Image (cartoon, rainbow, N blue to C red):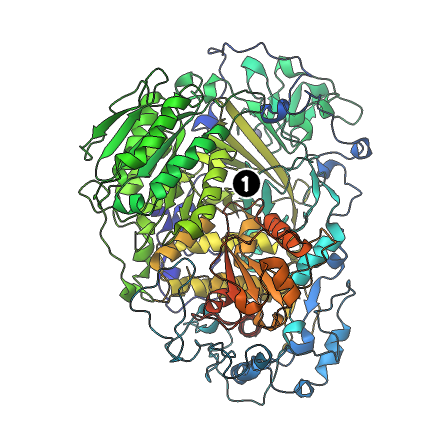
Amino acid sequence: MSQQGYVATPPYSQPQPGIGLSPPHYGHYGDPSHTASPTGMMKPAGPLGVTATGGMLPPGPPPPGPHQFGQNGAHAAGHPQQRFPGPPPVNNVASSYAPYQPSAQSSYPSPMSTSSVTQLGSQLSAMQINSYGSGMAHAGSGMAPPSQGPPGPLSATSLQTPPRPPQPSILQPGSQVLPPPPTTLNGPGASPLLPPMYRPDGLSGPPPPNSQYQPPPLPGQTLGAGYPPQQANSGPQMAGAQLSYPGGFPGGPAQLAGPPQPQKKLDPDSIPSPIQVIENDRASRGGQVYATNTRGQIPPLVTTDCIIQDQGNASPRFIRCTTYCFPCTSDMAKQAQIPLAAVIKPFATIPSNESPLYLVNHGESGPVRCNRCKAYMCPFMQFIEGGRRYQCGFCNCVNDVPPFYFQHLDHIGRRLDHYEKPELSLGSYEYVATLDYCRKNKPPNPPAFIFMIDVSYSNIKNGLVKLICEELKTMLEKLPKEEQEEMSAIRVGFITYNKVLHFFNVKSNLAQPQMMVVTDVGEVFVPLLDGFLVNYQESQSVIHNLLDQIPDMFADSNENETVFAPVIQAGMEALKAADCPGKLFIFHSSLPTAEAPGKLKNRDDKKLVNTDKEKILFQPQTNVYDSLAKDCVAHGCSVTLFLFPSQYVDVASLGLVPQLTGGTLYKYNNFQMHLDRQQFLNDLRNDIEKKIGFDAIMRVRTSTGFRATDFFGGILMNNTTDVEMAAIDCDKAVTVEFKHDDKLSEDTGALIQCAVLYTTISGQRRLRIHNLGLNCSSQLADLYKSCETDALINFFAKSAFKAVLHQPLKVIREILVNQTAHMLACYRKNCASPSAASQLILPDSMKVLPVYMNCLLKNCVLLSRPEISTDERAYQRQLVMTMGVADSQLFFYPQLLPIHTLDVKSTMLPAAVRCSESRLSEEGIFLLANGLHMFLWLGVSSPPELIQGIFNVPSFAHINTDMTLLPEVGNPYSQQLRMIMGIIQQKRPYSMKLTIVKQREQPEMVFRQFLVEDKGLYGGSSYVDFLCCVHKEICQLLN
Ligand SMILES: [Zn+2]
């Protein structure tokens, strides 16, 4: 991660006047490094740019016949070798390349698409700009009768609402159903949970101090000594509420607070509901086959289950875009300020009911590529001159078809073998790479896993070392392997460390493992080559012997100090010496204070919070880790870190190498064996077994007129185009932003090809290609119609979290709010039908953008509050940087399921409810999950039969909340609930620890932070407040 790339440019570097309408904010926070970068596609540098030369031929098998190719090896053994079947006949008439033959299929079959707008007139019409302050002063109280709602305009605007499927939560005229007042749940005196309160100036403030109650720490936070009570009026809490644009927008100063007004109320049911949007998409598209045969078609939401059939464009499991229709000109793009980005998850898991990727092998000839831009053969290449030449869809260069690849064309100009070759008819496939694509032109060695265990005093004492050693014995049986292989090709090695490093020789012919100690941590060397990295099966008895001995070996150690950078260095050197890529699994607990490179001091300084220097807390405290990460990537060494901190360990520094090497960071605060064991073991097992590619370089090519300009993820870039990754696994996504460098054409669209060159777990060098065609339009309405909010939020989160390293958070929050308002104002001005200025009109595709944006703004990374642990913020920042769209959606807007409504006969999940306290009920039991945490919330009047069924105890009072696993009770409720939890956990990269929360007991405060539509515990607007705030910004922009 080259840091020069993030230097701020003046307009954004500080909150100075002049943030007006004109500059393209684009979530960019000023990034001059890309403005001058050359057209990416012309650059042949790097392994992906190498042209296959005839001189060096691999000794491999002879090239297959023109029609011959096997399935991806990863699946070949599980299924009979099948011939590539081609798409189903029904689609044979449709070209896989839409522009030449428009498909009959609607690009967006949902009935929702018929409405271009969601008009929130009914309630929001009440939101005159001036009423903001006072309106907010009462909006949350829920005490005023509905009759005080605005008259006239309400019904008029509601009538304009386009037809839509039944949406009980969208307000119809006259159906103002107010949420239950807070007293329903937490009556006065019954609970520390106070009803939402608003500061008289219209800014959301924190709850007032409560002398009887100290909020508990966040789940990922240690309870420090100085845990100050909440202060009222302690300053602005968040962007949504502190929109004092220094220069103001044209139209006047942006003072949020207006004069006191009569009470106005906003019914939460009348504002767009994420649950409704999710449910509507499920209803219209769930369970269906989604064929990718049409350019620019909008896929089902990430929350909708469907079967995806590759018919010429990459599955949305691999690539999702912020919009599937790019504006034709950069002027249009600037006007709308909708980020043009793709979230690419190149190794996404494909469910067993969908086709795995096919593997194309052209033998020594290697993949067919465009001579000019080096794009790989794909459905976007147009064959001409009887099949002798083809025109590149990316750079328009006309290339000769290599003789071995020649095929005649049919009457519509398509090759006769079109459906027999994956690279001609599919969006995604793999190529076997030739030696030209290998380091030093020789085939890579299979990767290795090195397990590196911190054996300092605390890890021994809490039993962690013993646990790891014990469990590895069974987990190593499951090392990933190609399905046709009998045993995994991955070799394993073991190191333990505290202040010094211990290498182990576990060669299969040894009777006992041998230990070699390296005390010179200043310059780590690898004391043994032979016997360090071994085949697990062959050395199994020696390895088990070692794992049995390690806990005893250090049982009497009093060593508290640890090193960290030398540990990574040692692992990397060992891989380097063995000439193979690999992954380090490091189990570490403390701040590395021992004298060694990368030594860290406790620099956690809460005084920096909410200052311009806050960014320092997110930066590594030494550059040792940055250069170490570069070395690791250069040698294909990925680092996965399991952290077990009991206090500040400087995650920003320790986590840097895992982040930049495509590894994963896991963090278990105050690890307690009986509570956290299962979560950790699930994570470890999952991490060892997951599908992964090593030593990868990704290149994103585009058709003319636009190019990839910025990249976010667990990546490292040494130039402007090659995305280097020591490893990339099935859960990691890279978000790519695009910019225009010329006009785009509606005819040819905007084409993207992502190529990842990597080494498989068996040591084969391959190319994985994903192609996606987007539409282009000169109509803003088309652009808005084709947006995907979930992908937008993924982009905004990553760009903001990247900017956190270099920008004051206040500026970042302002830019996010600013850009949200811009996007919506542009829609209002150019696409919506005329209506009263006081109405908030949202494009259908962005209905829930405000609520999701608010969730992002109140995430602890962007919230400047000293109560939140610095390590937790650094941790969450890092996690989000590599998230795919499905994970970021759940992370920012958790799933909340009413369990008391369970139908034990159904296998369906109960319908989710909105994340707000008003949706809970005393008689209810709710399950909440965000991908990191899971909570089971129990209302004080939960049905006894459910309590009995789930916990096997007679009443609410008997429930022991000190458990992280539900007991296995042999009745339908228990089975059903545990099944639901299993489904939610499935496919998530992190194991979620379960917390049982009883209503009106202290841990409820932790749970409440995840009710993201409400006002945050540490500040952060409620959804209603934020919507009003955005609405006001829009009004100002429009004036
Ligand atoms: Zn080309």
Percent coordinates x, y for residue 231 in the rendering: 37, 78
The quarter of the rendered structure image containing the C terminus is bottom right
Residue 575 picture quarter: top left
**Pointer 1: what residue?**
345
Give the residue displayed 54% in from the left and 37% down from the top. Answer: 346
The N terminus sits in image quarter: top left
Closer to us: 660 or 688:
688
Looking at the picture, does residue 506 appear above or below residue 926? above
Q: Which x, y percent locates residue 817? A: 49, 65
Secondary-structure class at tag 1 = loop
Residue 580 appears in the figure:
yes
**Which residue type carries mark 1?**
Lys
In percent of width and height, residue 864 lies at 38, 66
Give whichever of 264, 378 is nearer the camera: 264
Q: Nearer the viewer, residue 683 or 277?
A: 683
Q: Tell me the residue at 46%/83% (across/down).
A: 201
Residue visible at 36% across and 39% down in the picture: 466
* The residue positioned farthest toward the front in the image shown: 954
Image vertical order of residue 346 relative to residue 861, above or below: above
Q: Residue 627 in the image: x percent, y percent?
A: 29, 38
